[in-house]
Image (cartoon, grey):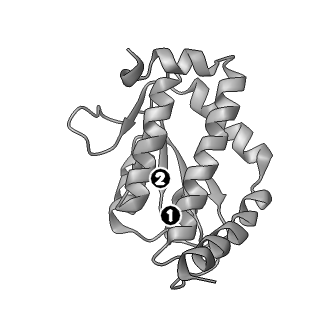
Amino acid sequence: MGTVAESLNYIMENFSNLRSVDEELIERICNILLSSQSIFVYGVGRSGIIGRTFTMRLVQLGLKAYFVGETITPVVGNKDVVILISGTGETQGTLLVAQISKRVNAKVVSITAERESPLSKISDFTILLKVNKSSDLAPLGTLFELSTITLFDAMVALLMKMNKETEEDLRKRHAIWL
């Protein structure tokens, strides 16, 4: 077996961690997203890239969503929810956004692989993604990142159902389809 096949098998085997995600918690968080004034998403590095993809889907769902740090991002307020992505739960920039969000009484949701991390402790809600440690077959947090984007896509499906949205509704808000 070549390296590519071995890596793909390793990654696919490790997706079973998503089966242990607390569905009731996810549904509760989705209800909070739908009832919030605005949704803010933040992550650093590849977590940030994944956060941007989720933010785009939220906008396509017709929700007011922003990625923290963009020039057009407004100020977070007490009727907002902030979703923070950090595999370690220790990323300094992410912790700073969490602290600021808590100071203005926004709801803070964290996605992390570490239950006892500083990010988990400051968050109102933590979605724990249990992943194996990095390896040469999935280096530097790949399993966490792929699990996060997969979870977000499942949350989009739930949000679509809860808001009675169809793929056609999202397509109408998708810039490329105009």
Q: Are marks 2 and 1 in contact (CB under 8 Å)?
A: yes
Residue at 51% from the left image edge and 85% from the top image edge: 136
Comparing 65 with 118, the one in front is 65
Q: Residue furthest left?
A: 71
Q: Which mark is residue 84?
A: 2
Q: Position of residue 32 (x, y in %)?
A: 62, 33
Residue 157, by quadrant, is top right
Q: Which residue type does callout 2 highlight? A: Leu
The residue to which callout 1 is attached is 119
Q: Which mark is residue 16?
A: none
Up/down of 144 relative to 176, above or below:
below
Q: Which residue type does callout 1 highlight? A: Leu
Q: In the rendered structure, which disc, 2 or 1, sits on the residue that comes first in sequence?
A: 2
Q: Is residue 19 left or right of residue 160?
A: right
Residue at 76% from the left image edge and 65% from the top image edge: 16
Q: Residues within 10 Å of mark 1 (few under 14, many from 20)?
A: many
Q: Position of residue 118 (x, y in %)?
A: 50, 69
Q: Position of residue 176 (x, y in %)?
A: 37, 24
Residue at 44% from the left image edge and 43% from the top image edge: 53
Up/down of 104 relative to 172, above or below:
below
Q: Is residue 39 left or right of residue 151?
A: left
Up/down of 77 relative to 47, above or below:
above
